[in-house]
Image: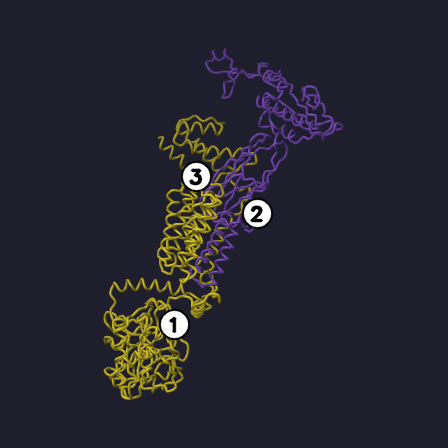
Chain colours: A purple, B yellow
Amino acid sequence: MSFADAFPGFRLRLTGWGIAYLVASVVLGLAAVNTGNNALMALLGLALGSYVVSGTWSRQVLAAVEATVGLPSEIYAGHPTVVDVELANTSGFFPAYGLVIRDPDGRRVLREFYLATRDRRRHSVEIVFPRRGWHEIGPWRLEVLLPLGFFLKSKILFTGRRVLVYPRLLPSSAASVRRGGGRRSPDALELRGREGEVTQLRDFRDGDEVRAMHWKQTARQQRLVVVERQRATEKPVFYVVDPRLEDPTDPYQLERFEHLVSEVATGLVRRLREGIHVGVVVGSLVVPTVCSIRRARMLLQPLAEVKAISAAGEAPPAVDNGRTMSFRVGEEGSL
Amino acid sequence: MTVESYRRLLGILFLWAILPLPFLYIVMPPFWLTAVAVGLFMSLRPSARLRPSGVVLNLIGVAIIIVVAAAGGIRVGPLRPLGHLLLLLTSVQVLMVSDRRSFLRAILLVFLVWVVAMTSSTHVIVAVYFAASAVLWWWAGLTVHLAGLGFSRKVDVSIPKPRHVVVAAALALLLSVPIFLVLPRLRSPWIAGRGGVSSVTGFTSHVDLAGVGTIRQSHQVAMIVRSVSGESIRSEWMRLRATALQRVTLDSWAPRGAYLVPENTNGLIRLHGDGWRLADTVELEIELVRPRRYLFLPVGTVALSSPVAVNMDPAGGVTLASRVSGPLIYSVWVARGNPPRADDPPTERAPRFVLDPVAQQLAKRIVGGVGSDAARAVAIQDYLRQNYGYSLTGMTQQRADPVSWFLLHERRGHCEYFAGAMVALLDDIGVPARMVAGFSGGNLSFDGAEAVIRQANAHTWVEAWVGENDRWSVFDPTPEGDIPTLSRPSGKERIRWATDWIQSAWDRYVLTFGFGEQVQLVTAMANGFEALLRRVSWRHLPWVLAIVAAPGVVWWLARRRRAPLPLPRRIRTGPASIAVERVVRQLERDGVDVPLCVTIRWIAKRARDLWPAAGAAIGELAWLAEREMYMADGPRFSDRATVRTLWKQVRQGMRQTA
């Protein structure tokens, strides 16, 4: 394994303490050579020996400490994101003291007091992304100062990773969820009733709703029987986000646009959590409806990536197979 | 780390730094007692702080200068007042510590105090102090740096781990040995004097009284004498003579050049002609451990058989014609009864030195009324034996005429002083005399047929020309009790030798280690390497190389990281998931109905309900399994060792619940 593999992005910086130690060693050496005092020679030997041991120790620790970083599947702007960082000391001989991990701006992300040989520790690091869109985490650097702090050695612990940050989710009071959403909305209620043709009666299975029970047949047959119905034809809802702004450079309009995107995302997430079919039209992109929160990425990714354009831009296409709800800055009903 | 912790740590370090000072002459008791008081105060009452005003600090500064000046000590050397000043300044600085910055400033002064204390000590026990100091400084360094990073010892009171500190310090000490050996010994002309004031006993062919200081006894083996016939070795055979030394200056003696080539007949060199029959002699075999220049011959030796060529000097000394490495064994034949005496005539051209007038009067007073030269020599010998004491210490003063200084002032010294003084006194009264260097006595084996002679048995005595008949007669002015004799060592003596040996080794190889020793070391290593090359043939070279390279290859193999397996062969199920499946099987065995489609959390909940003792480990396993299965950026397998440990804990919990 080459040096670059073992120490990616290696940096070495002499600390103030290291400078003082070096100067003291030089003075000690001059005194020893000048006087011929062998006790001074022994002290100088110990000083240089400690220098070598300290350097070797910190180098081995830097090479042996590894980190794995786990990111959550969904990251929302303005919401604390918990990143799972696991530090592992792979060395069988050198324990690690005083590990510090810093982000590219030099801020301390986390620190580890002591990591024994062959030991691993998990940490949770909270990161808040202020805005939606693509962001990069890292590269984070591992700094080793100990044991005696002559040099500050660091390497890149993990290279930068691009993450997509979804729009900020608004609290209920701030989001106008009544528009096209909410538990009392018609499209939500559509799924709650018992509409649809009866297709068959069958035995109860784990997970069936109690409301689907056919009580008469259950009482008659002395076993649980449920009714299976054909689902009523649904009319899915499409949220149409029009990114056209009169002046895309106007900060006020941009801020309103961001809020609008956040509002749409909030509505989307809430509806998907309730199992309602929702689609989205962002600019010229039409994303078909989904009804599971696990597929929210399909809808949230265009919302995370959408950028405001000028008013002369292309208008969102019309959607035929569903009801649409338009969102545009400056229109009535929006911000 | 709180301010109290810093103050307590500094107090401990300060006490440790001044530990050797009470045993040294460098600092006077009031000063080190003050420092001890400050150290104890800081260690025991770290919360009590002193905040003197600027005026008070100025007054303290003036007071320190006055006290140091009043204590004086400049005549002993500048180190004493400087030491006083350093101790008082450090004490004040230590007392003023109120935060990390002031702690770091004060610790530099404490370190300086430690350096002064360390380097002023010459006793061997300082080696132990040195090693312990290395551990303490490493521990302090780690602790202070951890505190500097914002870590507190409250997190874990046993951090840094003592074993880590001890190992690191031991490695640093180990590394310091080769560094100590190779550091250049270039003495600056700014430093006057001859360097170390300590020496060790041992044979020397050049006696220089002006340069001798305190002497430690070295019990390094010089030679072994064996009786070939098995006869017990007698004490009169154990005065082993190297050669006679001629007075060169007032205080130094040197041998004469060895330019005579002795006649070798059938491997035998007869030192006193053919008049002596070997049948009337006893044969001794002498093994010289480190042959230098001279062969040592018992007084009364009539013949010599040497495996190497030798030369002779006019005074009867036998020297090696060439350099010999390794032990040298030679045989000598010593006359029984009246031994032969050296008969080379006194040197007419020998330089004459005028003795101190007071010493001249002393010589006249000693031999007053005595007739013959032999009687005069005996009178001087007896006078020195009775009126002067034997000592190996205190001869550090450099004098223009050490002999007169010994005779008139000090009145104590070692054998070279006694022999030198007797030669000078005899010279003064017109009796030719010379100093003889060699060994005396030794340690007998249990059967008495072997004697071990050590460097501590090195001795000098006197030969005086006391007439044509008596020729060069042997005199020994050293007090009889202090002449090394032939004896069997007791247990107590062996213990004393051991401690002496340690101290002398410390003096010889550490305190006085210099450029000469470095050259010797390099020479010895070169010789050893050469000997190794002679023993190892080219046929064995591959094996030697293989043995040397094996540890490196093993290390490389151990460090080499394994390349990831190709994808099709990789296990797609993580270890934590497998462990959770085992938990499911165990649940089913215990009667829990586990549906076909369940979440990991459902399994963990049922398992925790069933085996509460394994709850924590099951939760951890479930967390790992979820990570393996549901991570956004693909599966991430858990560490097998961790999962194994958790599974053991789960099994243990299951058993406990059962």
Callout 1 secondary element? loop
Residue at the spot of label 1: B399
Question: Comparing marks 3 and 1, which lies closer to the viewer?
Answer: 1
Tag 1–tag 2 contact (CB < 8 Å) = no
Q: Could one spot residue B49 in this view of the protein? A: yes
- Of circles 1 and 2, the one toward us is 1
Measured Cα–Cα span from mark 1 to mark 2: 68 Å
Separation of marks 2 and 3 at Cα, in angstroms: 31 Å
Question: Disc 2 sits on a residue from what chain?
Answer: A
Q: Residue at x 50, y 18 (%)?
A: A203
Residue B22 lies, in percent from the top left, at: 35, 55
Is the C terminus of chain B in the top left, top right, bottom left or bottom right quadrant? top left
Which mark is drawn over residue B414? none
When asked about the image quadrant of residue B456, the answer is: bottom left
**Left or right of B443: which side holds B654?**
right
What's the chain of the residue with tag 3? B
Numbered circle sitting on residue B155:
3
Label 2 sits on residue: A8
Quarter holding residue B220:
bottom left
For residue A96, say whether it is visible.
no
Dot 1: chain letter: B
- Do circles 3 and 1 both sit on a common chain? yes
Does A217 sit left or right of A268 as displayed? Answer: left
Q: CA distance from mark 3 to mark 1?
A: 65 Å
